[in-house]
Each structure stands twice: as structure tokens, then as C-alpha cells.
Amino acid sequence: MLKRFLFYGSALLVALISVYAEKQTWTAEEAKNISQRMQKYVDAPMPADLSKYSSQEKQLLQALLEAGKLLDQIYWRQTYYNNIPLRDEIVKTRSEEDPVRKFFFLQIGPYDRLDNDAPFMKVPPKPPTAGFYPPDMKKEEFEKWIADHPADKDAFLSSYTVIKRQGNNLVAVPYHVEYKEFLEPMAAKLREAAGLSDSPDFKKFLLSKADALLNDKFFQTDVDWIDMKGNKFDMVFGPYEVYGDELNNLKASYEAYIEIVDTKESAKLDQYTKHLPEMEADLPYPEKYKNKDTGLTAAFAIVRDIYRGGDARAGYQAVATNLPNDAEITSKKGTKKTFWINALDARLNKIIAPIGARLIAQNQTQYLTSQGLFDFVLMHEIAHGLGPNYVQGTKTPINVALRDLYSWIEENKADIAGLHSLNYLEAHGIIDKSLSNQHYVSYLGSIFRTIRFGTGEAHGKAAIVTLNFFMEQGAVVYDPSSKRYGVDFAKIGSAVDKLANELLVIEAEGDYARAQKLSEKYSGTTAEVQKSLDSLKDLPVDFIPVYQNRWN
């Protein structure tokens, strides 16, 4: 798709950017198209009463919010190489209430994230290079440069560098150099917040995060983040997910969540930490591949976010996360699972429940519950920390081995290994066995929600692969008379174990070809599934958090 847009040389690059930065004109039909695209979203009010906090605590939160806005500016540059000229033009020519401007800012660029990144402005198809590489770069050129210049390998494969051309050469520019104009004031805001914190752990984390943003060395700050105890406030802040890099799945996008901690509910989830070794041991894949490092930390935080920035607010709205992703940190320390309870409520009530009312077998809709969804999301995030971290017998991180296939394989693994682990917890009396049907049906409802994002997106592709696999196994059954789907509770457990084995072995062996075969066989959308999706066109696909922070 990109062939006609490829170019070489800096002069031509400048010329092309100027063309696409020219004033965009809109016909009535194009404006109508924007309105139709907006209908895929529904506003979800997110009220937060911050008046109860002291003046000092309010200042702390304000400093964090300002840091988040600076981070947002970095992400604008990462998601598409020509974003800033386009944004400047739109701000100059359109009011804040203009639909085009609102949609552009919602997508953080000219591509519809809920329509497989289809352009809605006069721009070329979205390049897989985003803003991380020269826009004309192909994977083959990247790999050849590394092969020919082995001394550059570590820097080029780093998640924290931008690849640029310098004449006939390629160079890897560290994030802390490339984004210095935003990172230095951002770090200052975090240090200001640290000076206002009464929590020693939160203060320590904020200071180490400020340092890390200025040197791209995140190990210590992630350790400090995982180890925090008793803090009122929390944040996910920095470069983490690599989904935006569609060329190699290597480069991390900046994201920010500013959060209020529900300390009582968070403490309840600590019970899962002691069961991590058993859950790993119980996973259905060969013993030789299993992660024997059982001394890892798994911290849990249930929070309500009051701000999302960068990758966190673009398109798909997350309800939970398991971070960090860096293989060195996860293998030596562990991870932290964060759950945004306000976002989880919005997903169920605004999106999944209306879908379930139409597509789930009527005698099973009773099992579509907030508890069932929460437990599934919880175990999905826990399962990101289960399974192998490196390809067996090597120090090659799995994302490096699987490259462009990694994101959907990892999301699929987290879904299915999470369902398997729920079965383990039920069988051992750790959670109530009566919740089993709720877990499966709530997951089925979430599958249709996720597929609607498009099967080219990592979560959407994982969902369609699972649905097709389960239907092949008879674990999910379609009734053509009612046009509804139901779970066969007698078969679903076996299907989960078979798919979990496939995904875990692919990761353990770093088997790119096997992952590709799985995709080829199961990632297509059948006619009956497409008709089901078409029947949901009048329903929103995702929610937009509308933050209502009350300070007084």
C-alpha cells in the first residue's frame, strides 16, 4: 500500500510533508463521514471528588497532571511523523467544537484507530514506521543495517531509540535526546510532586522516574514502582507498549495515567501473589519451557484514573495493564497489575452489556456480570507475567523473536492462560467455583467487543483467533435461529487448554512460522460472525473518558 508514497532524500521528505500540511478542505460528504465515525464512541463521565485532599496534595496532583500533558506532546510525535504540521493547521483553521478537529484530537492524528487506521484526512495510508523510523524504511533495510553494522545492534533494537537518517547512514537517537525539550520540564514537575508527597515510597518513585526519563534507564524506577506501599496516589508513566511500532514491535510509546488508589480493594488482591508459582506450574505446556523463577513480585493496584495522556488516551481505552514489559525487569523483579475500576465499569455498562443483550444466548446472559468481567481482566493481566520471558535457551526476548506477530500472540496468551488459571484457582478453592460460568460468558461478550476494533489490531486479532478456535472445538456454539452464541460449558475447558498450549509453545520457541500458521488458519472473519458484527453497527464500539475532577 505504501509503494507510491515511498521516497528517498531529505529534500523530497520536506516537499512531501509540506504537501500533506496544506490546508485540508472538506466536502459535505466527508464531514458526514466524520460524524459517522464519531458515532462509534460514547461518552463515559468519570467524576472524581478531589476536594477532600489537602492543599499540598492538590498541588501534587496538579504537578502530575502538568507532567502528563508534557508527555502527551511526545506521543503526538511518535504516532505519525507528520502529526505536528497537521495539528497546527487544524488548530489554526478550526474551532474547538468543530467535528473534524475533535475527531483528529481524539485519534491523535489523521487515522481512525477503530477502523484499522483508515485515513480520514487527505494523507497517505498510515506507515508502519509511525514516528519511530524514517517513513520510507522497510523491515529489510532495518535488518540489513543491523547485519552490516553489528555494533549498532543494541541501540537499534532498543525500545527507547528513534531511528533516523544522517546522509547515507542510519543512527539510533535515544529518547532522552530526541524528546529533551519535553522530558526536562516533565522531570522537573515530577520532582516538584515528590517534594509535596508525604509517602516515602511515592517520593522515591517520583524521583527515580524523573531520573529515568532523562537517561532511558528504567530498571530502578520500575522496581521502586512495584515496591510502593501505602501510597494514596499512583501513576503509569513513561514509554511502555510497543503496539504503535508496526514495523518491528520494538519502539515503546509514551503513556500516562494519573490515579487515585483504592487502598482497601488493592490489598485484597495481594492473595494472588503467593499463588503465582502454582499457576505457572499448572500451565498446559511442556515442563522444560516453564518459568522457574518463582521469587518474582506481583503487585496489584485498584485505582480510579483522573487523567489519561499519550498512548493511554488514543483510541482503545484500557481497563487494566500489566507492566513493565521490559524482559530484564520482568525476569528479575516481576510486574505490577493496575486496574482502573471506573474504566471497567464504563466498558461493561456502556459497551459489553448492550452487545451481550443481542448476541449472547438468552439463557446465558445472566452470566454476563461485572464480577465475571473483573476476574477475567484480572487474570489476563496476571497471565501477562506468566509463561516464558525469553526464547528457550537464549537471551532473546520473545517480542524480538516474533516481531510483528508478537503483540497479538501475547494478548491471546494472556486471555487464554488467564482463563486456564481461573480454572486452577476455582479447582483449588481460592475463588468460588460458582463463578466459572460468569468467567466464560463475560469473556465471550468481551470477544465481540474486541473484534469490533478490527482484527488488524492486536487485541482484535487475538479475539477473532480465539472465537474461531473455540467454535471449531465446539466450545462456543452459534444458533442460526436466534442468531446468538452460547458457551458449551462441557467443552470450553479442553479448548482453553489446547489453545493455551499452542500459544505458550510459540512464545517459548520464538516460532515465527508457527505463529504465522495460527494466524492464517484462524484470523479470518466468517460470514456468520460478520453478520453478527453488522447487527451491532448502531452500538458504540468504545467509550471516551470524560474526566470531571472536582477540586473545591
Image (spheres, grey):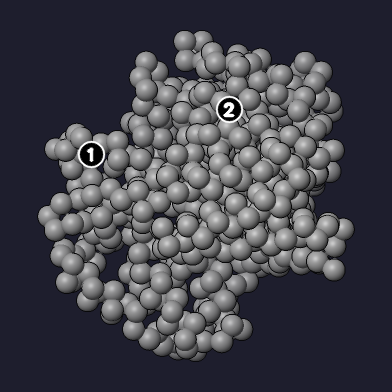
The residue pinned by badge 1 equals 152
- Residue at 74% of width from left, 42% of height from top? 199
Q: Residue at x 22, y 69 (%)?
A: 13
Q: Would you say 235 lies left or right of 406 here?
A: right
Q: Residue at x 83, y 57 (%)?
A: 54
At mark 2, the secondary structure is strand
Neighbour tally class for label 1: few under 14, some 14-19, many 20 plus, Cα within 10 Å? some
Name the side, left or right, on which 41 lies relative to 238: right
Front position in the image: 475 or 507: 507
Quarter occupied by the C terminus? bottom right
Q: Could you say where residue 30 lies in the image, as x and y percent from the top left?
A: 47, 82
Residue type at the position of mark 1: Asp
Q: Mark 2 vs mark 1: which is more N-terminal?
A: 1
Count up the numbered dots.
Answer: 2
- Which residue is at the front of the view, 494 or 374? 374
Q: Is residue 460 visible?
A: no
Residue for badge 2:
334
Tell me where residue 486 appears, x and y as whole percent: 71, 40
Q: Quadrant of residue 4?
A: bottom left
Numbered mark located on residue 243 in the image: none
Q: Kindly tell me whether residue 61 is visible in this rendering.
A: yes
Residue 26 x/y as whole percent: 44, 87
Q: Quadrant of residue 58?
A: bottom right
Q: Residues within 10 Å of mark 2 (few under 14, many from 20)?
A: many
